[in-house]
Image (cartoon, helix red, strand yellow):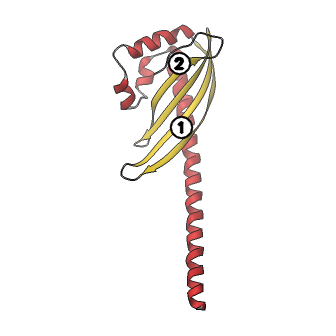
Amino acid sequence: MRRFLSVIGALALAGLVACGLGVAVLAHQGSQLDTESKAFVDEALPSIAAHWEESQLLDRATPELRASLKPGQLQGLFASLAKFGPLVVYEGSKGTSTMSYFAGSGTTITASYVAKAQFQNGAAAFKIILLKRDGQWRIHNFHVDRIPGNRSAQGV
């Protein structure tokens, strides 16, 4: 009986150690994903908003975002956003990444961020959703609002 309890104890200890290592690996990987996704957003948004160039968004967009755009939709959006004027100050982003596993479809890595920027003709808040595929972050959703007190802008 004593040997049986020793084996059960050793198995339980091994299971606890494995779970602890798994949690540590996931925490490290989650932190790394947060760092990567924040760096992507903080590079992409100033590039997109500096001169409101559609190509800057499209170069970073997921195929799903590109496919969802109706003809002329992006041109209209960027014509409206150009009324903000030149980018004066990018205030940075805040957000986090999420890793999900679904049986049959595998792992999905997403990130959601909010960022603010000051422009010559007002302030804007960005809401960005990213997807990570094949080791690269891509913009899956891009939305811009004027900060309250200004006229509202549209999003994609």
Q: Quadrant of the C terminus?
A: top left
Along the line of sight, which residue is nearer the eye, 113 or 46? 113
For residue 77, above or below residue 61: above
Per the model, the C-alpha gap separating discs 2 and 1 is 18 Å
- Whole-percent x and y of residue 28? 58, 52
The amino acid at mark 1 is: Ser
For residue 19, above or below residue 141: below
Circle 1: is it few (<14), some (14-19), or many (20+) Cα within 10 Å?
many
In the image, 125: left or right of 44? Answer: right
Along the line of sight, which residue is nearer the eye, 56 or 30? 30
The residue at which mark 1 appears reads as 37
Helix, strand or loop under label 1: helix
Q: Residue at x 59, y 69 (%)?
A: 16
Q: Residue at x 56, y 73 (%)?
A: 14
Q: Earlier in the sequence, mark 2 or mark 1?
A: 1
Q: Residue at x 49, y 40 (%)?
A: 110
The amino acid at mark 2 is: Ala
Q: Which mark is residue 49?
A: 2
Q: Residue at x 41, y 13 (%)?
A: 75
Q: Which mark is residue 125?
A: none
In the image, 123: left or right of 71? Answer: right
Quadrant in the picture for residue 73: top left
Q: Quadrant of the N terminus?
A: bottom right
Helix, strand or loop under label 2: helix
